[in-house]
Amino acid sequence: MAFARINGVLLHYRLAGPSDAPALVFANSLGTDLRIWDAVTAQLADCYRVVGYDKRGHGLSDAPAGDYSLGDHVADLTGLLDHLGIGDVAICGVSIGGLIAQGVALLQPERIRRLILCDTASKFGDAALWNNRIAAIAQGGMGAIADSVMERWFSPDFMAQQPDALAGWRNLFLRSDAAGYAATCATLRDADLTAQVSRIACPTLVIAGSADKSTPVEQVRSLATAIPGARFEIIAGAGHIPSIEQPDVVSGLIADFLKEPAHG
């Protein structure tokens, strides 16, 4: 395990792959940690310097008090890359991780070679949705929303056919820091990049799971449409976190995209 204190916050991170290979960063969804990318990392680490990390409020990273802004998350990631001496990167983010990736691409466009945005959007829901979720956690803890979150994370087929895996991911969710989770819900409540994503200039791949109930296909497609030249792909049968359900497909899409001539 490796840790770095960035902007006063202890971040947990992990490196894999050759130190001189092009850097590829993975950013996680709400209520998860870097392990959601393990199966994908295993397939890409031969060719890339893979960086996984737990954003603030998640995994083994600190959960400072107070609401987190998108700017906080973006500064954490760019600060971690500076700490690691990594310049230009490709970033792959899912859900809020994709929102963070968009934020980095807008703040430091010269740094981003490629962008892979999975099951994400430029804005997530409205204030009432997130305030209600924050209130539910305050009243009943992570268990109060666990079942509904699993239904939004995973496809019906995954839930029916892999009950043990489902139970394991539910355990991960239940053991998440409730305060850190709620503070990150505030990020999603307050962030809106809708008017800015058209400025993203790097080559971008946008991926949607066809069975995603959290960011439905058409919402993800609208993000791809808003980013000039973005490619849009649908993974049939996948839910909100396709790196868990279909890592081989995700790895293949990323590998092919990163090998195109414009990369690097």
Image: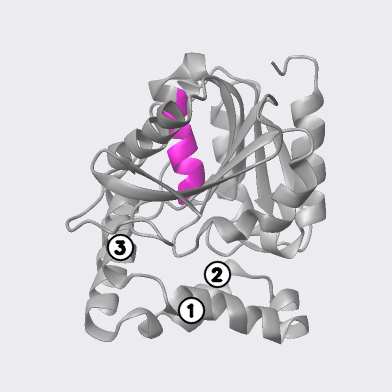
The residue beneath circle 1 is 148
Q: Which mark is residue 152?
A: 2
Magenta part of the chain = 96-105
Judging depth in this view, the residue of 207 and 87 nearest the camera is 87
Q: Residue at x 70, y 37 (%)?
A: 232
Q: Are marks 2 and 3 in contact (CB under 8 Å)?
A: no
Q: Which mark is residue 234?
A: none
How dense is the environment of label 2, judged by Cα within 10 Å: few (below 14), some, or many (20 and up)? Answer: some
Q: Residue at x 73, y 75 (%)?
A: 158
Of the residues shown, which amino acid type is indicated by label 1?
A: Ser
Q: Tell me which colouring the rendered structure shows.
A: one colour
| 2 vs 3, front mark | 3
How dense is the environment of label 1, judged by Cα within 10 Å: few (below 14), some, or many (20 and up)? Answer: few
Q: CA distance from mark 2 to mark 3?
A: 20 Å
The residue beneath circle 3 is 180
- Whether residue 193 can be seen here: no
- Residue 112: quarter of image: top right
Image coordinates for residue 21, horizontal then vertical, percent: 70, 26
Of the residues shown, which amino acid type is indicated by label 2?
A: Arg
Image coordinates for residue 66, horizontal then vertical, percent: 17, 56
Image coordinates for residue 29, horizontal then vertical, percent: 50, 56
Q: Are marks 1 and 2 in contact (CB under 8 Å)?
A: yes
